[in-house]
Image (tube, rainbow, N blue to C red):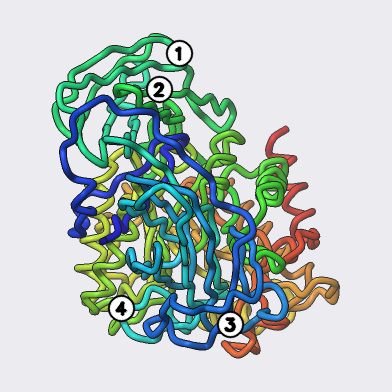
């Protein structure tokens, strides 16, 4: 049984993303054309308490036979956030008994760092990329109780093809981060519904529909928008595209985040896709939402918490996003992996704009040149796009944070990643966060140029910035202006430009006014936001970062006191630092 190892998740409701072009085979039994009328699929959430065992056995040597499940663990959850496994590196093995029969679709919403998945002792497949949702079609067997085992390893793999390397500056929590679902179906199911606005004046949309588990010959598909019928059409193939018109709609924007629902019926099978009517384009150096220029102000945000790892409860995600919105921000950059459905659903509803990016961090030439790394990057980036395509909050696709894009090895990979995204979705803009500026070989490929820079913190080329005990405002502004000049060169000036990371660290409670103090951080953060709001060239900033995040105490430890990246404007428990309050005052003044 081979997995459909693309990101396959509810199309904002019952429809699941169905991968295309991955080169992996479906379960042969699921690809047969079957006659007869299909019944409503039956979907169950498998979240809750699972049996658990922990080993130091490598993942590739694991066998599900004879495991002594001597503990319990929650799903979603990270096993290395709780005793006695806290900070341990090894193999966490999860088991759940499941009543099922016949054709089923198993969806694992995201885990890390890698896993093998078994059904009744039979391996369904492997997951090689953290956070990537994976789907399997299989014959569950006779009616009765079956055993589902997911073995998850959080040991870092240093080989070039690995998607999480030792130098990544965020903690590699281990566990099943997101929900697991099982869906039974008879003859076929609706895999995927993608809705793309075409004309926000006429109300037309493109709908891509994908059928899985068989094909209902002679069937028709019915559509309605928010309960109003939108047509019935013959279903001619498992993958089909339709152009539909809405009779009534409202535009989605941060100020008015209106959402609509497309309901789909094929026989007895139904699905629903929630979406927003809006357009995202670039022109004359600006990002345009519904034809109007945007000024993006917000934060890079890791979707993590020291008590929960990457399985952040919904109420805490909501609290974070409400804080960000009510401060006066309109933007988050999801760092540095695809964001969960919880995050994106809430951003849709709150009107927060999102940069969603696939996992990657500081990858060096020997990694960028690995064909296995390239294949996995394209697979997971394509999967991210398919997974998140119906979220109106997502306006930017990104990848490869701070990769060595000076290296010739990067050019082909960036080209392939941009092509993979555009094959799946041309309704959004593409970017990546570069730290190489003029030396970057790939700036011609994305739609938006984004630079990570840290004047006044890391940059040692500007005396008076890094070597000053106090913040040097004029030197800092001069450095920002230098980067604006770089992206105003003739070959770049028509592309929008974002400060994708900028900021300074602050140890909570340090009020000395020097480096590492809350006041020093506040001076840098407010200065860059004032510059972005007052200058025409940058169209946005994602301050690094919203909250302090766990990293490695043995990696670059002198710059990571407490084993945390301390550049959050709130600490890891969301307690505000001085910068949070000063930014709030600045943004409140902007809105008056």
For the residues labelled 2 and 3, the Cα–Cα distance comes to 60 Å
Q: Which residue is mark 3?
A: 463
Q: Which mark is residue 263?
A: 2
For the residues labelled 4 and 1, the Cα–Cα distance comes to 47 Å
Disc 4 and disc 2 in contact, CB within 8 angstroms: no
The local secondary structure at tag 2 comes to strand
Looking at this view, is 554 or 255 the one in front? 554
Q: Earlier in the sequence, mark 2 or mark 3?
A: 2
Residue occupying image coordinates x 40% and y 70%: 116
Q: Which residue is mark 1?
A: 227
Placement of the C terminus among the 4 image quadrants: top right
Looking at this view, is 405 or 466 the one in front? 405
For the residues labelled 4 and 2, the Cα–Cα distance comes to 40 Å
Disc 4 and disc 1 in contact, CB within 8 angstroms: no
Q: Earlier in the sequence, mark 3 or mark 1?
A: 1
**Which class describes the residues within 10 Å of circle 2: few (<14), some (14-19), or many (20+)?**
many
Q: Earlier in the sequence, mark 4 or mark 1?
A: 4
Does residue 416 lie above or below 170 as drawn? Answer: above
Q: Is residue 395 visible?
A: no
The local secondary structure at tag 4 comes to loop
Disc 3 and disc 1 in contact, CB within 8 angstroms: no
Q: Earlier in the sequence, mark 1 or mark 2?
A: 1
Q: Quadrant of residue 363?
A: bottom left
The local secondary structure at tag 1 comes to loop
**Which class describes the residues within 10 Å of circle 3: few (<14), some (14-19), or many (20+)?**
few
Q: Is residue 316 visible?
A: yes
Q: Which residue is mark 4?
A: 161
């Amino acid at each position: 049984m081979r997995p459909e190892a693309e990101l396959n998740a509810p199309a904002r409701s019952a429809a699941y993303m169905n991968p295309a072009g991955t080169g992996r085979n479906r379960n042969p039994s699921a690809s047969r054309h079957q006659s007869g009328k299909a019944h409503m699929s039956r979907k169950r959430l498998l979240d809750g308490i699972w049996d658990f065992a922990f080993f130091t056995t490598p993942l590739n040597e694991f066998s599900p036979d004879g495991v002594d499940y001597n503990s319990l663990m929650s799903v979603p959850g990270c096993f290395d956030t709780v005793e006695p496994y806290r900070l341990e590196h090894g193999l966490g093995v999860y088991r759940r008994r499941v009543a099922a029969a016949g054709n089923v679709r198993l969806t694992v919403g995201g885990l890390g760092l890698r896993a093998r998945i078994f059904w009744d002792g039979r391996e369904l497949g492997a997951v090689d990329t953290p956070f990537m949702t994976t789907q399997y079609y299989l014959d569950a067997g006779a009616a009765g109780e079956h055993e589902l085992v997911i073995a998850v390893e959080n040991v870092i793999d240093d080989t070039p093809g690995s998607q999480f390397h030792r130098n990544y500056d965020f903690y590699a929590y281990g566990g099943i981060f997101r929900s697991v679902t099982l869906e039974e179906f008879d003859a076929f199911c609706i895999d995927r519904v993608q809705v793309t606005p075409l004309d926000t004046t006429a109300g037309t949309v493109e709908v891509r529909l994908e059928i899985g588990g068989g094909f209902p010959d002679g069937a028709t598909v019915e559509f309605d928008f928010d309960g109003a019928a939108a047509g019935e059409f013959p279903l001619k193939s498992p993958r089909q595209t339709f152009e539909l018109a809405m009779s009534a709609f409202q535009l989605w924007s941060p100020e008015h985040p209106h959402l609509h629902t497309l309901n789909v019926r094929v026989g007895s099978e139904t699905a629903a896709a929630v979406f927003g009517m809006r357009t995202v384009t670039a022109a004359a150096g600006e990002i345009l939402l519904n034809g109007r220029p945007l000024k993006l102000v917000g934060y890079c945000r890791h979707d993590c918490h020291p008590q929960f790892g990457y399985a952040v409860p919904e109420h805490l995600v909501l609290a974070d996003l409400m804080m960000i919105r009510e401060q006066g921000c309109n933007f988050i950059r999801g760092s540095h992996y695809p964001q969960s459905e919880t995050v994106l659903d809430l951003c849709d509803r709150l009107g927060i704009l999102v940069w969603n990016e696939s996992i990657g961090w500081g990858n060096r030439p020997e990694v960028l040149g690995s064909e296995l790394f390239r294949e996995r990057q394209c697979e997971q980036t394509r999967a991210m796009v398919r997974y998140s395509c119906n979220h109106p909050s997502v306006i930017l696709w990104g990848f490869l944070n701070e990769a060595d894009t000076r290296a010739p090895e990067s050019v082909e990979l960036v080209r392939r990643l941009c092509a993979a995204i555009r094959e799946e979705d041309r309704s959004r803009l593409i970017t990546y966060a570069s730290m190489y500026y003029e030396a970057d070989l790939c700036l011609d490929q994305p739609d938006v140029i984004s630079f990570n820079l840290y004047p006044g913190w890391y940059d040692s080329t500007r005396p008076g910035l890094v070597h000053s005990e106090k913040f040097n405002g004029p030197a800092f502004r001069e450095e920002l202006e230098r980067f604006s000049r770089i992206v105003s060169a003739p070959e770049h000036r028509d592309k929008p430009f974002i400060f994708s990371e900028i900021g300074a660290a602050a140890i909570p409670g340090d009020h000395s006014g020097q480096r590492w103090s809350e006041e020093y951080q506040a001076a840098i953060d407010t200065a860059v936001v004032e510059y972005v709001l007052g200058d025409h060239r940058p169209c946005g900033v994602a301050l690094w970062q919203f909250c302090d995040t766990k990293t490695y105490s043995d990696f670059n430890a002198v710059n990571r006191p407490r084993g945390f990246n301390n550049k959050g404007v709130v600490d890891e428990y969301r307690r505000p630092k001085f910068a949070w309050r000063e930014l709030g005052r600045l943004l409140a003044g902007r809105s008056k």
